[in-house]
Amino acid sequence: MAAPRILTVDPERLNRDVEMAEDSPTSKKHVGVEFEKRFPLSRWEIMVAAGVFFVFAIGLFCIYQTMPAAEYGKIKLPRSISDLRILKDQLGTYASIHPTKFILGYCSTYIFMQTFMIPGTIFMSLLAGALFGVIKGIFLVVFNSTAGASSCYFLSKLIGRPIVYWLWPAKLKLFQGEVAKRREKLLNYMLFLRITPTLPNLFINLASPIVDVPYHIFFLATVVGLVPAAYITVRAGLALGDLNSVKDLYGFKTLSVLFLIGFVSILPTILKRKRIYE
């Protein structure tokens, strides 16, 4: 009877085999397929998104280059109420000396952040109230929010469908069904969504072109619907010393007022349905 063979493994050879397997076209193809399954955008869509981002970024950089130099050290985007207080003190004199240049830089930064969904626009809105007052602050916030939301709308129309399906499949399906049921009074419904915090503005900006919300309705609902929230934020910016966190902006009283205004916006739809059933 033959003696059993003892199998030995050469560690160096095993390592070489593993490295060759990892470098083989088959393994690279497998990794590429797995990446495409996890990430929803194709290479072409990634290139388009990067191209749009760099065009906006270069435009923003050119605007900054034309602005007079600041003498207040390193200025950064605020991430907290304390950062905002410091920034307000730093920019107050600058904004009064160079109002046109400062507003141009402020608007371009706000629109850039809104277009590419960069967190922090709430602090930019508070800063508008702190530096410009109620009337001018509301105008700036609504203008920038509408411009940024419109840019986000068209960017999503171009490449956003796979991202929204990937991030919010259930929420998108629900939103699509609600929009389909309210085609005749879609403006009222979009106003309700903009006024109340029922759905995040980020989701509305990205999902609206995917569920076929016409741009003119999206635009009107954004311009009008953002005014109440802009008024609340700008007024809060006037009293930064009394504000401890962003959560203080939307207490029970504030949310109740927003939902009341939102209910008024959809009241015509409710009355019309009542007449139909009668």
Image (cartoon, rainbow, N blue to C red):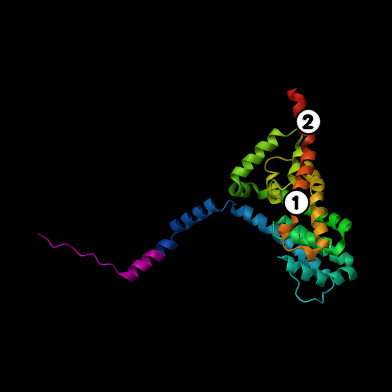
Can you identify the residue that label 1 sits on? 149
Specify the segment rendered in magenta: 1-19
Can you identify the residue that label 2 sits on? 271
In the orientation shown, which residue stands out farthest toward the left? 1
Residue 195: in sight, yes or no? no
Residue 47: in sight, yes or no? yes
Q: Position of residue 260 (x, y in %)?
A: 78, 43
Q: Position of residue 47 (x, y in %)?
A: 64, 56
Density class for disc 2 (Cα within 10 Å; few <14, some 14-19, many ≥20) is: few
Between residue 213 and residue 55, name the one nearer to us: 213
Between residue 261 and residue 220, name the one nearer to us: 261
Q: Amino acid at mark 1?
A: Ala
Quadrant that contains the N terminus: bottom left
Q: Which residue is pictured at 88% across the width and 58% down the height? A: 136
Q: Which residue is pictured at 77% across the width and 25% down the height? A: 275
Q: Earlier in the sequence, mark 2 or mark 1?
A: 1
